[in-house]
Amino acid sequence: MQWPARQEFNNRSGGLIGWGLALLAVASGLLIWLGYLLLAPYTVDSPYSSGTMDCESPIADPYFQKDRSPCGPERDWPGLMLILASSVPPAVAGTALCVTGSTRRQVSAHVFSIIEMQKVEERRQKKQDEQNKQNKQNGQGSPS
């Protein structure tokens, strides 16, 4: 009777863990994208000529976001920080769901092991009571 209930409980816990891992994957993807935007060199249309201009990564460029740099407006800090800020909610929710799911599984396993120990103790006590009853009927009495 308890095994199907435990399986259902574990399946629901697995669902929580799965959703948590999916949200953590989304947050990781956003952070990888942010890292790429911060560390990768890129090209922009040159304001000085009709071609393109190679730009260093925002981290490596000392003139990034200065008035003199034509590369700054292409990757502005508010846009980059928006990506960082948008990765926080899925990371927090994903972590909470993973922790909740794994804690539910551990608590479930603990509760069911306690139930099994109680059943074993009840069987042992019942067996001992039957032996004591049988000993009394045979006239031997209790050894204690």
Image (cartoon, helix red, strand yellow):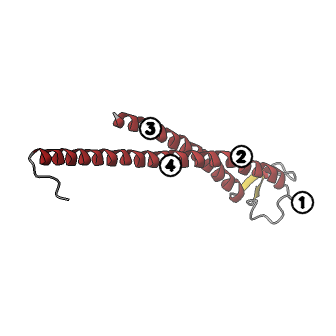
Residue 87: percent from left, percent from top: 68, 48
> What's the residue type where badge 1 is placed?
Arg
Amino acid carrying mark 4 in the image: Thr
Do the residues under discs 1 and 3 have CB atoms within 8 angstroms?
no
Amino acid, disc 2: Ser
Judge depth for marks 2 and 3 and give the one in front: 3
Query: What residue is shown with label 1?
Result: 68
Q: Earlier in the sequence, mark 4 or mark 1?
A: 1
Q: Secondary structure at mark 2?
A: helix
Please tell me whether mark 4 sits on a helix, a strand or a loop: helix
Q: Crowding at label 4, few (<14), some or many (≥20) Cα neighbours within 10 Å?
A: few
Q: Residue at x 63, y 45 (%)?
A: 93
**Disc 4 vs disc 1: which is toward the camera?**
4
User: Residue tagged by mark 2?
Assistant: 86
Mark toward the viewer: 1 or 3: 3
> Do the numbered discs 1 and 2 sit on residues whose CB atoms are within 8 Å?
no
Q: Which residue is mark 4?
A: 103
Which of the two discs, 1 and 2, labels the residue nearer the N terminus? Answer: 1
Q: Nearer the viewer, residue 137 or 129?
A: 137
Q: Earlier in the sequence, mark 1 or mark 3?
A: 3
Q: Seen in the image, is 109 located left or right of residue 98?
A: left
Compared with 39, 23 (above or below) is above
